[in-house]
Image (tube, rainbow, N blue to C red):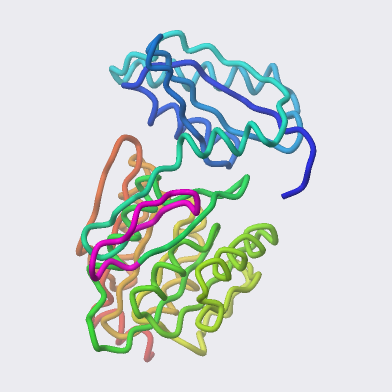
Amino acid sequence: MRRGALWQISIATTAEAEEAVADLLCRRFGRPASTHTDFESGLTTVSVYCEARPTNWPEQRATLGEGLRQISCCGLAIGMGKVSIRKIPRENWAESWKRHFKPLAIGDALLIKPSWSRRRPRRGQALVVLDPGLSFGTGHHPTTKFCLRQLTVERQAGKTQSFLDIGTGSGILAIAAIKQGYRPVHAFDFDAAAVRVARENAQLNQVTAHARITRRDVTKLPFQATHRYDVVGANLISTLLITERQRIAARVKVTGLLVLAGILKSEFEAVRTVYEQLGFRLVASKAGREWHSGAFRATAYFNSRKET
């Protein structure tokens, strides 16, 4: 990791509202949030970290304040709701994540943990070791959890199943898929930093021989795919899921599973509608706070449309 200072943007809140506040900061700055609770004072602080001081900080602060008011209107007590910014050494950022990032189990199939954790997987539980990059999450976000769970549910022991990870970020879905036996596994992201981090995490987990991680732009994919997959995961913003639906759908195999996440509750029906019009059927969904994710099965109607 490069040396130098980081900018810490923090909001003092309550344990009740910490997840909603973390989502607010994540959406605003495009970075995962860490949380620290002082058990003596009961004060919870949610923070994100940036390479440079955010531009137009007074405007950014006002936007965060409006977001906090919306959280409060949903019935969550936000407490102080104080927004602050300060410059800190990178070592402080690393220690913050060590407090925040705890092992995460996805049923009996998968355990995700940071390298500093001593927790061991149970018998039959695949292990993913993942240290957070500055801009990339760790699997704790509800949309990522949904994708991980769908990978474990869809996996059929002894059967060859392929996986495509669109918008891979830290590479967590691709690595988890490999660990559970998916082959081949391909992943891409538009962000060059994400590709670098995902490749580093693949190396950390000793799965580079099975992972093809590249830099690609979903908006530039050919409409006709040369390769289709048993499972396709797309954890993207709703606008991309809708506008690029033809490109995304073209990569799903006959009867394959398409897992869509990163969708706000208010936007889920719009996403669902356009994919059902393509011939997909919603088979699983999960709503939590302002997020709503869905898994869609390609139907015979979808298959007939591909052939015309």
Relative horizontal placement of residue 89, taking residue 160 as reference (left or right):
right
The residue lying toward the viewer, choosing from 93 and 167, is 93
Q: Is residue 167 above or below residue 222?
A: above
Quarter of the image that includes the C terminus: bottom left
Q: Percent position (x, y) of residue 275? A: 34, 65
Q: In this view, does 175 lie above or below 193?
A: below
Magenta stretch, overall SS: loop
Quarter of the image for residue 8 reads top right
The residue lying toward the viewer, choosing from 261 and 158, is 158
Instruction: Report if residue 119 lies within the magenta region.
Output: yes
Residue shown at 49% from the left, 49% from the top: 116
The residue lying toward the viewer, choosing from 126 and 45, is 126
Q: Percent position (x, y) of residue 71? A: 38, 21
Relative horizontal placement of residue 95, taking residue 5 as reference (left or right):
left
Quarter of the image for residue 173 reads bottom left
Q: Percent position (x, y) of residue 219? A: 60, 66
The magenta segment:
111-126
Residue shown at 45% from the left, 42% from the top: 101
Give the number of callouts. 0
The residue lying toward the viewer, choosing from 205 and 238, is 205
Relative horizontal placement of residue 260, taking residue 138 as reference (left or right):
left
Q: Percent position (x, y) of residue 287? A: 26, 44
Q: Residue furthest right?
A: 4
Residue shown at 48% from the left, 88% from the top: 227
Q: Is residue 281 above or below residue 181?
A: above
Relative horizontal placement of residue 70, taking residue 107 as reference (left or right):
right
Instruction: Report if residue 215 lies within the magenta region.
Output: no
Q: Which residue lies furthest to the front in this view?
A: 118
